[in-house]
Amino acid sequence: MSERPSFPGDSLAEAGLNRQFVFDLDDLPAKVRQTLGDTTGFCQLILLGHGGRRLWECVQASGIASEHPIDDYTVRTVECWLATQLPGRAYRIVYPGDQPVGLQALGKLAGWHHTSPFMVGVDAEWGSWYAYRAAVLVDFQFSAFFPVDRGNPCLDCATTPCITACPADALAGGVFNLQACSGFRLQPASPCAEGCLARQACPVGAEHRYEATQIAHSYRRSLAMLRHYLNQP
């Protein structure tokens, strides 16, 4: 049996997609695999994310001015990479897309995701300044990755600055109160409209904190989704 090739992810990392993980589909838990939809004909799932500011810098430099520039840039970058690295091979980008992919579950399997009081996953290196950007089914077999668990930094946090920094008191007792958070964000001139003060107070990975423009972009989108969900203007 021939040895599987290593995943050629350097160009993806240079393009800002610097968190990469390859799963063999047969090794995924059934519930997680079901979130991918029909996987017939595919062998592996490639999970891509970004950590830090590099991706936003690349998006800005690309000149994409769409409603969803990060997603559009990601798809374009992934499709170019696939055309170069896996020409002629079948693939399907299941995220971004309409498929409700279990990204958090995949992140936990990869060792990327640990729960924080402010409900954004935290990693010992990147803090909360990372995100899942693509999930791609492929009919190729790279060397599968092994999870690297650097531990949950929240477990060793004695001062819990995120809890005290929340002006909505939505993290009292270390338990997230969605109603308190949402209600405060929707208030006129809320300081949480374009950024989470609890998240920004977390010291883990602070050197990787997004630029202010990226934070505002992401939170404007989440606020618009919140208003839509609650049917508020």
Image: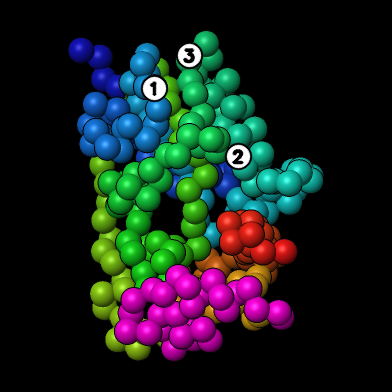
Q: Which residues are magenta?
A: 163-189
- The Cα atoms of the two marked residues, 2 and 3, are separated by 19 Å
Image spot of residue 125 (x, y percent): 39, 63
Give the CA distance from mark 1 to mark 2: 22 Å
Reading the image, the residue beneath label 2 is 74
Q: How is the image coloured?
A: rainbow
User: Does 2 appear above or below 173?
Assistant: above
Find disc 3 in the rendering and name its residue: 89
Type of residue at label 2?
Answer: Thr
Residue 106 percent coordinates (x, y): 34, 44
Residue, x 35% and y 56% (percent of image)? 113
Of mark 1 and mark 2, the one earlier in the sequence is: 1
> How much space separates mark 1 and mark 3, taking CA atoms?
17 Å
In which quadrant of the rendered image does the N terminus lie? Answer: top left
Quadrant showing the C terminus = bottom right
Q: Residue 46: which quarter of the image? A: top left
> Which mark identifies residue 38?
1
Please state which amino acid type lies under the numbered disc 3. Arg
